[in-house]
Image (cartoon, rainbow, N blue to C red):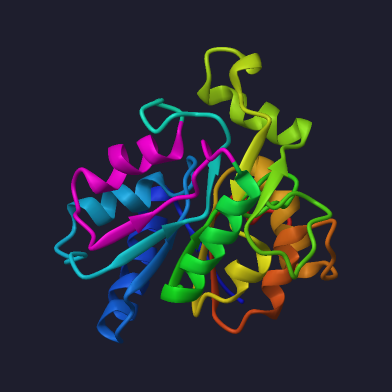
Amino acid sequence: MKIITVKNQTDGANCALDILREKLSQGAKTLGLATGSSPEAFYKALAASDLDLSQVTSINLDEYVGLPKENPQSYHYFMEEHLFRYKSVKEHFLPDGQAVDLHQAARDYDDTIAQYGIDFQILGIGRNGHIGFNEPGTDFSSGTHVVDLTPSTIEANSRFFDKKEDVPTQALSMGIASIMSAKSIVLFAYGKEKAQAIAGMVQGPVMQSLPASVLQKHPDVTIILDQEAASRL
């Protein structure tokens, strides 16, 4: 793991943009994208950059179950608002959280990942160490799957909704094996509430109770942190 400590999210976004620029120059064609507050500054920097994404395919990590694409809290909506309205990509894929058969939708998504591969994966990390919506206890060999969100994740995500009761309790998430198949990974973490998870991810044993710890086994991971998130290292 390469760890970069930055002053703020803007500096972190610029670091990640430099890495992406290098990967694109080396032939990267497929981006794995994340949502949430951690990558927002990166998408803002990417939208304002001169990078041409017209021949790039994007594959998102996850989507809530039950939210229509037009819902402002859906990840389809998030990606449109933060990136796709500014930068056109060749194709983009997100899990179908409204599918009648969610398990078939998960298998179909794995087929998409297998077809395109992932050259450059963006990640955030949850307070409990989840990546994507792979909650503690998720098998490291997992593919895309239906997730029952933990109370701590629902609580953390409730800040984006009018009421906690509005937060979906399930999601479709790319699996840990799919994330680990990416050629290169950049993970953002900001704020003191992420410090414990970061310390466990970097310094602790690799264990399913802290899903992000599996990244210790990946050959090309860059962790971009502010001082607070790095405070326990």
Magenta residues (range): 74-100
Q: Residue at x 30, y 87 (%)?
A: 26
Q: How many marks?
A: 0
Residue at the (35%, 44%) spot, across then down: 79
Q: Where residue 64 appears, x then y in whole percent?
A: 56, 37
Q: Nearer the viewer, residue 3 or 105?
A: 105
Residue 107 located left or right of residue 29:
right
- Name the side, left or right, on which 30 lies relative to 202: left
**How far from the left and from the top, in percent, is residue 92?**
33, 56
Position of residue 122 measured from the top left corner of the image (x, y, whole percent): 47, 61
Q: In which quadrant is the C terminus drawn? A: bottom right
Residue 82 lies in the magenta-colored region: yes
* Left or right, 68 with reference to 204: left
Q: Would residue 224 be visible to someone looking at this image?
A: no
Residue at the (56%, 65%) spot, across then down? 110
**Towards the viewer: 70 or 180:** 70
Picture quadrant of residue 217: bottom right
Whether residue 97 is visible to the viewer of this picture, yes or no, is yes
Q: Is residue 168 above or below residue 138?
A: above
Q: Is residue 179 magenta?
A: no
Which residue is drawn at the image coordinates 45% and 53% (left, top)?
7
* Quarter in which the N terminus is drawn: bottom right
Res 77 quadrant in image: top left
Q: Residue 88's quadrant in the figure?
A: bottom left
Q: Is residue 206 left or right of residue 49?
A: right
Q: Position of residue 181 (x, y in %)?
A: 57, 76
The answer to whether residue 64 is above or below residue 141 is above
